Image (tube, rainbow, N blue to C red):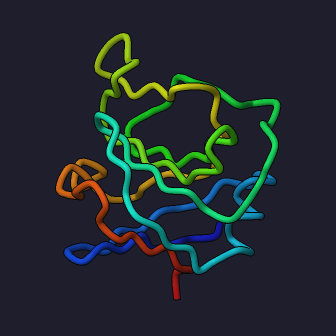
Amino acid sequence: MKKIIIKTADMSIEAELKDTPTAEMIFKSLPLDGNANVWGDEIYFEIPLDLELEPEAQEEVEIGDLAYWPSGNAFCIFFGPTPVSKDERPRAYSPVNVFGKITEDAILFKNVSQGEKIQVTAYQ
């Protein structure tokens, strides 16, 4: 199983990737970086990939899920409810390809501010 590290100025968090085409393309594109967009308890940032929706794409996701949002070419980190959530679970704005999971406490992403630099690298 492939692992990645998601870093901000104040933290470094590990995540495991699933065995999906999206996960493979993201892993091959590392390192990636961007500036955080905060939308409820989701952070997303644009990445230089243009991938299609996978057959398992979904709007209902879990806390700690990593996903790719084809509509925005974005890397998404879910750690709680979003503005379109129906309950306390995260919900994407539109279907996303879930490609990984945070292996630590995803709630730490609450400390990330709008515009903050995020870097994603392969686990060494």
Q: Position of residue 56 (x, y in %)?
A: 75, 30
Q: Can you tell which quarter of the image residue 18 is in? A: bottom right
Height in image: 123 above or below 83? below
Indicate the position of residue 88 as horizontal and vertical percent values: 29, 20
Q: Residue furthest top?
A: 86
Name the residue: 37% across, 41% down: 42
**Quarter of the image where one finds residue 85:** top left
Give the image location of residue 78, x and y in percent: 40, 42
Query: Which quadrant of the figure has residue 55?
Result: top right
Q: Position of residue 87 (x, y in %)?
A: 32, 13
Seen at 38% across and 38% down, the residue is 63
Q: Please identify the residue farthest to the front as the structure is shown.
A: 115
Indicate left or right for 42 with 122 as reference: left
Q: Is residue 50 left or right of residue 93?
A: right
Q: Is residue 59 above or below residue 114?
A: above
Q: Is residue 89 left or right of residue 24?
A: left
In the picture, the quarter occupied by the N terminus is bottom right
Residue nearer the viewer, 12 or 83 = 83
Q: How many marks?
A: 0
Residue pictured at 37% horizontal, 58% vertical: 36
Q: Could you tell me which residue is drawn at 39 percent across and 69 percent down? A: 118
